[in-house]
Each structure stands twice: as structure tokens, then as C-alpha cells.
């Protein structure tokens, strides 16, 4: 290893330049930002100018690049921390930071109620919750949208690699144990001639590249991909969304960390190159037809085998007690990793020590490159030799990058020349934005949606074939979801291992407690009712965790927001309303936010104007399953069971539903209504039934509603279903369309053994039918047949929906 490191290319001299800014006008400052692709506004550049007026000199290009990365939306979340003047239906209000008001405050209130559950939130790469007396678990989800749009394989590949490093950089090094992925693509049947811009990759190419990128990184790292989701919509043709998440486990004693003066900062792992330049600022700008050519260098190049080595090195160093602090080297490269680690104390950085992939890098390139597979550790200086020995064992290159000194300045040296010298307070003091937003909720009408009884079977077939519903099996099969040997509830189950599940459950080595993972996103809801979408996403995520057997009191969630142009007042208004709704449900359910991320400027300038994605919220979550006997799958187990509906009553409203896509006028009557307090009480009752062993299987009623849930239940291959809807729990004003295909949150379809029926009924469950030995789906209402089809007729429609495209 030493010979390899010593022979690596390094810079021979400092290459940097001074950029005059002190005498520039406001317009000239903005032009400079655009020319250098800094993604800094006119107001930002004015503050930059002020900093260097106070310093009495002009900046180097290194300093401008460091400030741009540090102040980028990706790194500083400036929109979520902005002061927003918001108007809702004509009523004005001021939101003093979306993050503080609707995320951090919610979590702080819940932490007061549950003082021994959340162990860390908002201060590290990921938040930790208590698993047992010795161990904690964490989950982090990131987006890699822009890189995946212009280079799907590499963008998604390094998206997963980056979030795995987030887990390695959480605490003093958490072990990655499971991953999830969530994608939003344009429809795979999009016609090439319908693309309204040149050099745009067809949705099929994006889908195939993204899936394989995530597959190759996760499989080669030996981390199971156990959960996920895919949405398809025309609005994602130009801006696909790629969410990658990883869960980790750590000893509780290794969560706390701190950098102190005198610590050495050691970089470990991959070498530094010209890939990933300006990645953080690139993700903070819109895409255009020129992006595919001009911004290729913003995309990183991944090497999962190198990351596997550095992961084993970090975990071994943690076990040896050598790590004082660790973080990943992601957006902004060394400038962000070292900059954040030294943000309290300051220190000196030596770029000439950095081994390179290739010669000829300039000073700013070495410092901000986002080349992959790199971690930065803080250690006591006397532990360097011991750390080197562990690095040799795991064949990982390490070098001294910096030293903390307590001088409160970030000073970067390159071959003896100071290429950056900034006060840490100014560097991390990005100007606060002030923004305007508005939202007017579309009025609801009451259209009559009439379908002849004999047509409901055909409606079900149509909905089962929708891209929102069809099986993801061809993609799931690309991933190893069994590696590490701890996947208890897999993403597919049933007699043939091809029936859908609501989420996954994994064991944790050395613990009797298990961890359930789930996710929810409903972008169709957000197009017209973002507030309801925020509430519904939280509910669906929590509901799936509860369905699988997690203790409702031991659930934590993450918020990941993506949107188009936040400078559009209407789009920003939708974001505000979505965040409000999300907070409302999270507080009602006692589900703290322990991590999150946002991605803005997901819009594309086409030949016909900008195309924005809808405000899209992904809520992912993890919950503690206290005993392996509590794990509940989503597939019918056997014939001869009773089937029940448990939870909320179905209410009117088809807005945002899959059914509404196919029926004129459906969805105009608004989203369905529900009560969090009522729903939360039902989840507690359900959990008591789980602990009694009263439930054989549970499938949540979500996209596609009851009819789809019944069909998917039967796809297990273990039996058929016979249901009578006369006693189905719904409000009196519900139509048959809303009963069969409505998507009211808070509902479960459960399978119950006959001996437990009375207990389920006593808890509020309503028996609606039974499982049969005949592989058939038969649904009636007061003797009138509504759905009558064999499982053999329905399942191929659902199962084959993506086969021809992937």
C-alpha cells in the first residue's frame, strides 16, 4: 500500500489565480457567478464582495469555489431556512424557516415526550434512534437527480455510494446494513418524437441506467437493497428523481464525536480526480439542453470495491477506538468535509499531500472535486501509526490532509502557498434568503362517476396495468436483497416469491430487536393538494411500518423534498403547504424526523419553455419490531381465513387516485378526508392484535384502493378471495368507485384466523369476506356481482407491466 501511495500522481505546484471582485458592480458580480458556474445570486455575491473588502484583498479562485460549494442549496438548505411570506387562499402569514417551524420543532416536541428514543438528530450525517440497550440504528436518504439526468448509470451509481458513505460517516462510523431506492421516471412508453428538447435521454434509457447503477454499487458492496418504490409521470421525463437510502447500526457509545485542536484530519479511500467538479453548485441550477455536454465533469465516477475497502477500514478503526470524528467526502469534496470538521475550531489543510487519479489538477480542483470513495477522519496524532497499520490491512490509502488548530480560520496550503484563508464564521454564514409564496386550493366539485356493475372487473384490470401499480419484479430481481443474511421480510413473497410487500424487515446482529423499513410518495396528490399529500405520505409510511409489526411508539421518519423552481411563488407555495401537512401528521403520530434532504431546481428549459416536476415528498421510515413473531407480511397465507378491514372509514374523494386517471371527472371532488387522532388510535389497537398473534397477513390500502389490495393479496398463490361489501366501513356518501378504488389513508386489509375473529371485531375490525381454495377474486355488493375474475387472469396484467421495458 505504501508503495502504491508513494507512486501516486501529485501536484507539482500550486495553480490558482486571484479574481478581482472588490471593484465590480452588482451586475458584474452576477455575471462572474454565472461565468464560473458558482450558482450564487446577486445578493450572495454582494456578501462575498463585502467579505473580501473586510479582508483587504481579492479572493483566489479556490476561495470563490469553496464559498460557492459551502453556500450551495445542496449543502446549506437555504430555501428551507429562508424567511417566507406566504399567502394561502388570500390569507397572509410569515414562515420563519420551514425547517425550524415544521421539522425541527416537531422532532423536539416528540423528543420531550420520548426522551429515550431519539439519540441524535440534525447534528450528524444521519439521525440515530435507540434499538436496545447497546445499539442504535439510523437511516439516511439522498437524491442524485441532476447527475442521473445527464449520466443515468454513473449518477445513480454514485448516488447510492454517497449515501452509504453518509452512514459510514454517522457517529464514529455506523455499519451499513440495508439500502432502499425510490425512483421517479417519465413513462417508459413515451414516444421519442414527444421529447421537446435535444440531447434528452429517453425515459427507458434513464430507467435502465439508473437501476443498473444502483444495482452494481449495492450488490458489489455486499449491502442488501430491501425496499423501494417507482413512480412514472410525464413531468419526470426531463428531470428524473433518484432517491437512494441506507440504514446503519452503531454501538450507542460511538455516536458522540468532536474535533478538537491538535487533531489530525486523515483522508482515506479513493484518489482525487477531475470527476465531480462543481457537483454541489450544479445540483442547485436548472437543467438545459446544454447540460448534457457542459456539465459532464459534475458527474462522479464510482468504484464500489474501493468503497468496500474503505468501509471495512473505517469500521475496523472505530472498533480499535482510533476515531474521534468521521465524515464522508461528498458534495464539495475536501472543501466541505474538512470545512465542516474545522467549522468550529479552524485549521490548516495541505493539498500537496493528496494522491491524484491523474496529474495536472489545479488547486481548486483538488480541493472541491467530488471524486468518490473518500472519507475524512479526525484522530489523535499519536494514533497515526496504528491507523496506518489498519489501512495497510484493508489495502486503503490514507494521508494527512489537515490539522485542527483552534485559530477559527480555514487556511489551505498548496506547496507552501496559501490558496485559501477564510474565517470559518464567514465561510459558514451563508446569507439568509427572503422569499414569497402563495397557494390557492382548487375548489372541489361533485361529479357523478358512474360505472355499470359488470364493468368493474375491466376497471380493475385497467388499474392493475397502470405504471403506478404494476409489479416492480423485473427491477427488484436486479438487486441482492439477501446478502448479509438478515433479511426477514423480503420485497417479494408468497408461494412463488413474486407477490408484493408493504416494506421489509431486517434482523440486527447481536440484538433481539428487528428493524422495519418502508417509504411513501404520492406526487399525483401534490399536483392539486400538497397539504393532503404531506399528511398522506406520513400516514402511508407509518401505516406500512405498523402493518409489518413495528411498535407504533418506536417509529422515526425522514423527509426528502424535490421540486421544480422555488423562485416560482406558486411552486414554493405548494412546498410550504406540503411541509405543513407533513408536520401535522408526524406530530399526531409521534413520529420524529431524524434526517432529511431537499433537492430544488428540478426543472428543464425545453424548446417550449420550462417543465417542472410537481412538488414531490418522499417519506421514508424505520421502526423497531420488538420480536420476530411480530413480523407480518402482505400476502394471503392460506385458504379458510377471514378477511377484515381495519382502521379508517373510506371517505369520498378520488383526487390524486390512480382510478381518476381513467375516468373523466373523477378526482375533481377533492382528496379523501381522515382524522390522524382516530387513525393513530387504530394503529395502537392493531399493534395489540399483532402481539396477540391474531393477524396472519396485512396489506395496506393505498394506491389503487381496496380492489387492487384484494387482488395483490390473492397474488400470493395461497388462495382466492370472496368479499361482500354490504358492511364495508365507509361513509354514506361514498360511491362504489370510492369504495373500490378510493385511496383514503389509514386502512388495512387483514387476514385473520377464525379463532381470532372476535378479538379483531372487538378492536374495531369489520369482516368483509374470506379466503377460499379457489384461485378467484369475487366481489359482490348486496348480491350484485362487481368483480369476478380468476387470479390467473388478473396476475399477468399486473406482473408483466414492466417486463417489456426492462
Image (cartoon, rainbow, N blue to C red):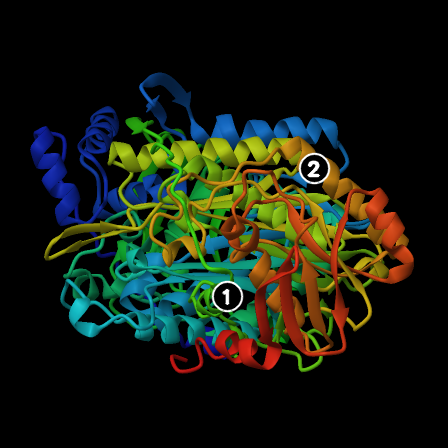
Residue 680 shows which numbered tag? 2
Q: Is residue 26 left or right of residue 459?
A: left
Q: Where is residue 234 in the image (x, y as percent from the top left)?
A: 29, 59
At 34% from the left and 68% from the top, the residue drawn is: 10
Residue 231: quadrant of the picture: bottom left
Single out the residue that lies furthest toward the front. 783
How many numbered tags mark residues here? Answer: 2
Q: Which residue is drawn at 59% across and 38% down?
A: 732
Look at mark 1 in the image and give the residue it sits on. Answer: 454
Which quadrant holds the C terminus?
A: bottom left
Q: Can you see residue 92? A: yes
Relative vertical location of residue 750 with respect to residue 774 in this rendering, above or below = above
Residue nearer the viewer, 266 or 177? 177
Q: How crowded is mark 2: few (under 14 residues within 10 Å), some or many (20 or more)?
A: many
In this rendering, the answer to whether 110 lies above or below 448 is above
Q: How far apart are marks 2 and 1 (CA)?
A: 37 Å
- Near mark 1 (Cα within 10 A), the count class, few <14, some 14-19 or many ≥20, is few
Amino acid at each position: 500500500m505504501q508503495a502504491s501511495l508513494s507512486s501516486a500522481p501529485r501536484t507539482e505546484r500550486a495553480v490558482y489565480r486571484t479574481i478581482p471582485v472588490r471593484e465590480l458592480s452588482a451586475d458584474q458580480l452576477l455575471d462572474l457567478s454565472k461565468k464560473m458556474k458558482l450558482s450564487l445570486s446577486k445578493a450572495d455575491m454582494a456578501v462575498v464582495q463585502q467579505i473580501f473588502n473586510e479582508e483587504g484583498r481579492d479572493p483566489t479562485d479556490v476561495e470563490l469555489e469553496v464559498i460557492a460549494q459551502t453556500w450551495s442549496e445542496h449543502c446549506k438548505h437555504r430555501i428551507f431556512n429562508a424567511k417566507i411570506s406566504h399567502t394561502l387562499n388570500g390569507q397572509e402569514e410569515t414562515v420563519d424557516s420551514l425547517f425550524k417551524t415544521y421539522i425541527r420543532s416537531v422532532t423536539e416536541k416528540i423528543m420531550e415526550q420520548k426522551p429515550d428514543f431519539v439519540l441524535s438528530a440534525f447534528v450528524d450525517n444521519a439521525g440515530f434512534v435507540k434499538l436496545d440497550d447497546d445499539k442504535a440504528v439510523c437511516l439516511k436518504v439522498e437524491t442524485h437527480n441532476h447527475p442521473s439526468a445527464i449520466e443515468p448509470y454513473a449518477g445513480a451509481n454514485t448516488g447510492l455510494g454517497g449515501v452509504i458513505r453518509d452512514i459510514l460517516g454517522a457517529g464514529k462510523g455506523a455499519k451499513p446494513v440495508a439500502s432502499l431506492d425510490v425512483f421517479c421516471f417519465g413513462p417508459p412508453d413515451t414516444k421519442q418524437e414527444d421529447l421537446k428538447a435535444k440531447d434528452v435521454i429517453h425515459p427507458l434509457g434513464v430507467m435502465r441506467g439508473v437501476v443498473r447503477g444502483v444495482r452494481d454499487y449495492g450488490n458489489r458492496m455486499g449491502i442488501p437493497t430491501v425496499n423501494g418504490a417507482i413512480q412514472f409521470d410525464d413531468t419526470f421525463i426531463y428531470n428524473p428523481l433518484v432517491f437512494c437510502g441506507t440504514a446503519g447500526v452503531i454501538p450507542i457509545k460511538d455516536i458522540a464525536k468532536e474535533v478538537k485542536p491538535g487533531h489530525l484530519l486523515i483522508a482515506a479511500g479513493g484518489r482525487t480526480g477531475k470527476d465531480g467538479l462543481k457537483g454541489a453548485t450544479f445540483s442547485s441550477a436548472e437543467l438545459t439542453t446544454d447540460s448534457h455536454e457542459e456539465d459532464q465533469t459534475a458527474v462522479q465516477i464510482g468504484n464500489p470495491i474501493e468503497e468496500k475497502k474503505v468501509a471495512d477500514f473505517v469500521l475496523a478503526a472505530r472498533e480499535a477506538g482510533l476515531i474521534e470524528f468521521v465524515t464522508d467526502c461528498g458534495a464539495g469534496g475536501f472543501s466541505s468535509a474538512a470545512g465542516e470538521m474545522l467549522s468550529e475550531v479552524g485549521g490548516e489543510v495541505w493539498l500537496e499531500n493528496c494522491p491524484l487519479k491523474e496529474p495536472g489538477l489545479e488547486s481548486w480542483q483538488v480541493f472541491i472535486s467530488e471524486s468518490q470513495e473518500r472519507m475524512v477522519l479526525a484522530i489523535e496524532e499519536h494514533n497515526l501509526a496504528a491507523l496506518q497499520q489498519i489501512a495497510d490491512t484493508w489495502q486503503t490509502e490514507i494521508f494527512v490532509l489537515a490539522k485542527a488548530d483552534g485559530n477559527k480560520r480555514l487556511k489551505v496550503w498548496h506547496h507552501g502557498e496559501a490558496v485559501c484563508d477564510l474565517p470559518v464564521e464567514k465561510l459558514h454564514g451563508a446569507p439568509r434568503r427572503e422569499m414569497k409564496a402563495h397557494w390557492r386550493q382548487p375548489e372541489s366539485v361533485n361529479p357523478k362517476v358512474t360505472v355499470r356493475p359488470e364493468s368493474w372487473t375491466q376497471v380493475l384490470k385497467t388499474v392493475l396495468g397502470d405504471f403506478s401499480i404494476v409489479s416492480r419484479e423485473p427491477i427488484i430481481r436486479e438487486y441482492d436483497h439477501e446478502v448479509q443474511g438478515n433479511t426477514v421480510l423480503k420485497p417479494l413473497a408468497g408461494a412463488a416469491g413474486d407477490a408484493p410487500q408493504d416494506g421489509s424487515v431486517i434482523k440486527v446482529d447481536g440484538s433481539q430487536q428487528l428493524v422495519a423499513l418502508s417509504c411513501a410518495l404520492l406526487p399525483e396528490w401534490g399536483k392539486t393538494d400538497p397539504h393532503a399529500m404531506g399528511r398522506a405520505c406520513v400516514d402511508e409510511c407509518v401505516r406500512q411500518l405498523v402493518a409489518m409489526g413495528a411498535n407504533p411508539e418506536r417509529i422515526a421518519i425522514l423527509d426528502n423534498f424535490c421540486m421544480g423552481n422555488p423562485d416560482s411563488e406558486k411552486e414554493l407555495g405548494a412546498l410550504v403547504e406540503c411541509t405543513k401537512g407533513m408536520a401535522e401528521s408526524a406530530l399526531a403520530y409521534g413520529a420524529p424526523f431524524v434526517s432529511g434532504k431537499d433537492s430544488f431546481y428540478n426543472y428543464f428549459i425545453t424548446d417550449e419553455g420550462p417543465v417542472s416536476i410537481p412538488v414531490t415528498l418522499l417519506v421514508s421510515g424505520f421502526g423497531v419490531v420488538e420480536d420476530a413473531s411480530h413480523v407480518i407480511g402482505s400476502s394471503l397465507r392460506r385458504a379458510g381465513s377471514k378477511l377484515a378491514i381495519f382502521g379508517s372509514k373510506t371517505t369520498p374523494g378520488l383526487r390524486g387516485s390512480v382510478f381518476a386517471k381513467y375516468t373523466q371527472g373523477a378526482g375533481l371532488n377533492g382528496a379523501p378526508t381522515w382524522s390522524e387522532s382516530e387513525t393513530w388510535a387504530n394503529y395502537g389497537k392493531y399493534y395489540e392484535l399483532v402481539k396477540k398473534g391474531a393477524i396472519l397477513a396485512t396489506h395496506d390500502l393505498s394506491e389503487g384502493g381496496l380492489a387492487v389490495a384484494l387482488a395483490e393479496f390473492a397474488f400470493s398463490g395461497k388462495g382466492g378471495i370472496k368479499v361482500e361489501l354490504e358492511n364495508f366501513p365507509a361513509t354514506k356518501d361514498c360511491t362504489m368507485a370510492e369504495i373500490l378504488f378510493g385511496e383514503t389513508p389509514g386502512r388495512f386489509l387483514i387476514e385473520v384466523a377464525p379463532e381470532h375473529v372476535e378479538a379483531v371485531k372487538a378492536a374495531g375490525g369489520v369482516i368483509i369476506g374470506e379466503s377460499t381454495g379457489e384461485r378467484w377474486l369475487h366481489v359482490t355488493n348486496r348480491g350484485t356481482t362487481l368483480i369476478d375474475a380468476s387470479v390467473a387472469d388478473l396476475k399477468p396484467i399486473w406482473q408483466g407491466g414492466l417486463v417489456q421495458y426492462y
